[in-house]
Image (cartoon, rainbow, N blue to C red):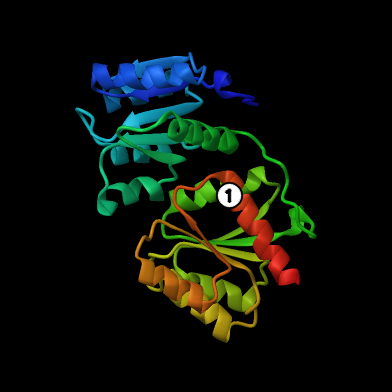
Amino acid sequence: MYASFQDLDILLVEPSAVQARIIRDFLAGLEVTRVNHVGSGAEALARMCERPPSLTISAFYLPDMNGVELIEAMRADEALAAVPFVLVSSETRPQVLDPVRQSGACAILPKPFTASQLAAALRAALDFLNPNAMLEVDADLEQLRVLLVDDSANARRFVRHVLGNLGIEEFIEAANGVEAMEILSETMVDLVITDYNMPEMDGRALVEHIRLQSWQSSVPILMVTSESNVSRLAAVEQAGVSAICDKPFEPKMIKRLIEQAIAGRER
């Protein structure tokens, strides 16, 4: 268990000594003192293989790779797949940051960031690491069946970990809306959590299918997505999604949204 920020053992991956010092000063202001610093992706992976940290904080542009390649290397290693990852970057282009979101980052911080933004990222990491308060729903959590729909296996694994911390144990996975439709035609579920952008059938089409054609038309649907187009998200809301949550998300937020979605169905 990680009771506070002080319990975190952080690996900071930052090629700039000046930026590393700034980040360490911010961390010290939050009483985080166990920080190891490396300057490249290769050094980071070697250090993590020796002793996995409780959290990795990394810049996007490294001398030998970028942040996407680093987090993907971590997710491909069974020993590092569950290590929380926070990106610090001045990048704002969605096409650059989206792969980081899809790989299950706990947070993406701007450069420069504020102390409150860093604290929120650390809280998200603590929530990811620790079993949280169980979902407050009128249902047997061990029997609650959740369908996860996302073309990113890393994103599905991240959501599954977060929901596992909330007491949910039974998951079914689909890589796109077509696979989800096939599952829903045969298997009853209590909750659908879906991405928006997927091949074959996207999240909006899946929501429309469930609400208009599925025998499970009243199932709660939570969309967890990096999609930022307002008109697309408005169309999803009109199609009947129960709630929309950004990637990356704070575990406490998804807990609240799931509770509201399930309670809304019961009413």
**x, y percentage for residue 82?**
51, 36
> What residue is rendered at 43% in x and 28% in y?
115
> Given the image, on which type of amino acid does mark 1 rest?
Met
**x, y percentage for residue 95?**
26, 53
> What residue is rendered at 51% in x and 46% in y?
158
Q: Which residue is mark 1?
A: 253
The quadrant in which the N terminus is found is top right
> What residue is rendered at 56% in x and 18% in y?
6
Q: In the picture, residue 105 is in which quadrant?
A: top left
Q: Secondary structure at mark 1?
A: helix
Q: Is residue 168 visible?
A: yes
Left or right of residue 101, residue 39 in this image = left
**x, y percentage for residue 224?**
49, 58
Please name whichever residue, 202 or 233, is drawn nearer the observer in this view of the structure: 233
Q: In the picture, residue 86 is in which quadrant?
A: top left
> What residue is rendered at 44% in x and 21% in y?
27
Please name whichever residue, 43 or 261, is drawn nearer the observer in this view of the structure: 261
Count of numbered tags: 1
